[in-house]
Amino acid sequence: MNKNKIYKWLTGSVMTAVLTAGISACSDDHFDISSDAAGKQTLWQNIQSKEQLSEYADILQSVYYSQTEEKTTPETYASLFDGDQTFTVWAPVNGSFRYSYYKDLLKSGIRDSIYKVEKELIRNNMTRYSHVVMGSDSVKLDLFNSKAAWLNNKNQTIKGVSITTPNVGASNGVLHITASAMEYQPNLYEYLASRRDLDSINAFIKGFQTIEFNENASTQGPTIDGQITWVDSITYVSNDYTRLFMGAFLEREDSNYVMIIPTNDTWRTNIEKTKKYFNFKSSYKQDIYTQTEAGADTTISGVETTFTTAEIDSLINLFSKNAISGNLAFNANWQYEQIPITSIADIRAVDARRDSLCSTAGTKFKKLGTLNATNKNEVVEVDDFAAMFGNADPVEVSNGYAYVVDEFKLPTTVYAPNMDLIPYRNYESCDNQCVVSNVNWEYQTSVVLRDTVTNEIIAQRDSTYKYTYFIMGNKTSTSHPGAFFKLPNVLSCKYDIYVVIGYNTDYNLQNKFRAYISYDTEDKRFNNEALKNPNEDALDAKGESLFEGNYFVNKQPALDENLCVNYTDTICLAKDFEFPVSYYGLTNAYPVLQLKSNFTSSERNYYSREIWVNAIILKAKEW
């Protein structure tokens, strides 16, 4: 993400999406509507005339209908139900809902409290258009607050609540009298705001919220002076963070997620940890190593990237919080082999099978020991899946399950990920002794092991190995090629740095090379700092130690315990190498790794000048 895109995120919404919410209508024709009031009285007149609905009627005439969460109209719900629009009302009888509690919320005069009554009581017990109880089928209805409720026609229940008097007809809809109010169940997005101990993550996520007008769900009025007017304006919540960063629509009722939710104390503790990984500096200037047309090595002064103090604070705020919250949501239904994870028992079952879990952001969580030595991008190793979710059964919400945790058990690699870089995608330039190319290489072998005494075959394995190599070729028979590779999105922390080198079967020789790194500190940039061999067991082709020296050598192919011939060697270039500043999200600033073939003329029979680079790996270390 370049600076312009980041800044756009910090100053406003990245983009808005127009979501279409379809609402199904049922015709009033051919249904068994009670004849005592059908077509004669409005819904409000019916409600007001029934003594057992007096408490509900009092609420309806005390609450003004809202166009948005912030904007009300001068029309009460009593007036709305006395008008021309068609609704179905599921009215709870006196004493069956928290009448005093809702009255106190209204008396408070606080807008959020008043809207709570509207959303959780009134809109939760009404639907648009006419719906009658008939037949024996179960029908899923969309309530006026976008929640879903199942109408069981055979048992005459709605969301499990008994309908004591069904199908009271009205001139503008249908009234059903119910034994109690339907229970309001928040979705995950709403649940974040329902608990004070979740204020921190709620404030961060809701900071990206916008309210969008839903033209398809709104009722169009007359056109005045060429402009469409609206009898009511239905809106929906849109959040660019949950949509673009998390890949989850936490506010949608038709979704099914599980989400790990850290409490405020847990959030604050981890913010202090993650913000260390995003130590941005005020100015980055990237030099590009390249060649002139004549082939001489040269340096081009690159683009300068600058940030104000306020921008740096915003970057740290966004990225440190995203590092925690970005991978907290999981699709409850779609996991490995479509197995749901709707309870802690389900998650333990996945753990026992050593399956993987995938977050909505695309990160795959795998069991320890199931990855290859070369870790792949967006893959995290986990010792205990259930521990990440707190090892307790979740709170059920209307679109999934909330796992509130007092301790953050996701591994460090969630917010400080390992990087497995493909050389040809991160290649920047080469020196004047190098020509570069790519090759897809396939090697087939038949491995046979024989008993040392009887010479009988005790094991045999046929294998095919496929590798993609970035080839650093030498221009002449005496030149030593060198190439430069970008290391994007490096964090301000320590890394173990590896390079995966392929054995050169064309020459049947190893490689001997040096490695250099260029990177920024707070006040300057170090260029081409030589890395020393950190491996105490490192030997050259003559068997001499390379430890703490400026050279690296890949091994010859060897048979491993699985009877596989290893034609690549993962070589550690540095242990605990610390980058003082962060490059996360920057496209015009990054550290650079240089690999350069280097050996003496007396060693030419031991080493190939041509180097086959398979991968560059950075493994972050926890602070």
Image (spheres, rainbow, N blue to C red):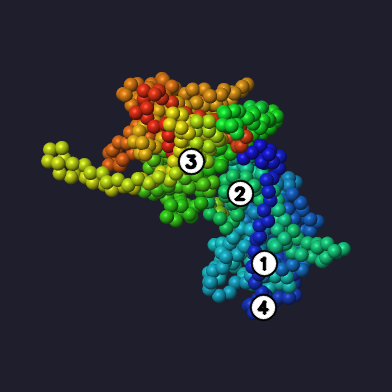
Is 272 in front, or is 107?
272
Q: CA distance from mark 3 to mark 1?
A: 70 Å
Is 586 in front, or is 500?
500
Instruction: Residue 276: tell me if it is visible.
Output: no
Instruction: Residue 517: tell me if it is visible.
Output: yes
The residue that disc 4 covers is: 29
Q: Point out the frontmost of discs 3 and 4.
A: 3
Asked if residue 469 is positioned above or below residue 345 in the image, the reply reads: above
Q: Point out the frontmost of discs 2 and 1.
A: 2
Judging from the image, what secondary structure is the residue with disc 1 in? strand
Q: Point out the frontmost of discs 1 and 4.
A: 4
Residue under the image location 74 percent in, 58 percent down: 233
**Left or right: residue 391 compared with residue 45:** left
The type of residue carrying mark 1 is Thr
Task: Estimate how packed mark 4 is, as few (under 14), some (14 to 19) or many (20 or more) residues with alpha carbons within 10 Å.
Answer: few
The residue that disc 3 covers is: 437
Q: Earlier in the sequence, mark 3 or mark 2?
A: 2
Judging from the image, what secondary structure is the residue with disc 4 in? loop
Q: Position of residue 590 (x, y in %)?
A: 58, 32
**Left or right: residue 489 compared with residue 35:** left
Image marks 3 and 1: residues in contact by CB distance under 8 Å? no
The type of residue carrying mark 2 is Arg
Q: Earlier in the sequence, mark 2 or mark 1?
A: 1
Judging from the image, what secondary structure is the residue with disc 2 in? helix
Q: Earlier in the sequence, mark 1 or mark 4?
A: 4
Q: Earlier in the sequence, mark 3 or mark 1?
A: 1
Q: Which mark is residue 243?
A: 2
Q: Which mark is residue 88?
A: 1
The type of residue carrying mark 3 is Ser
Total marks shown come to: 4
Q: CA distance from mark 4 to mark 2?
A: 41 Å
Q: CA distance from mark 3 to mark 2?
A: 39 Å
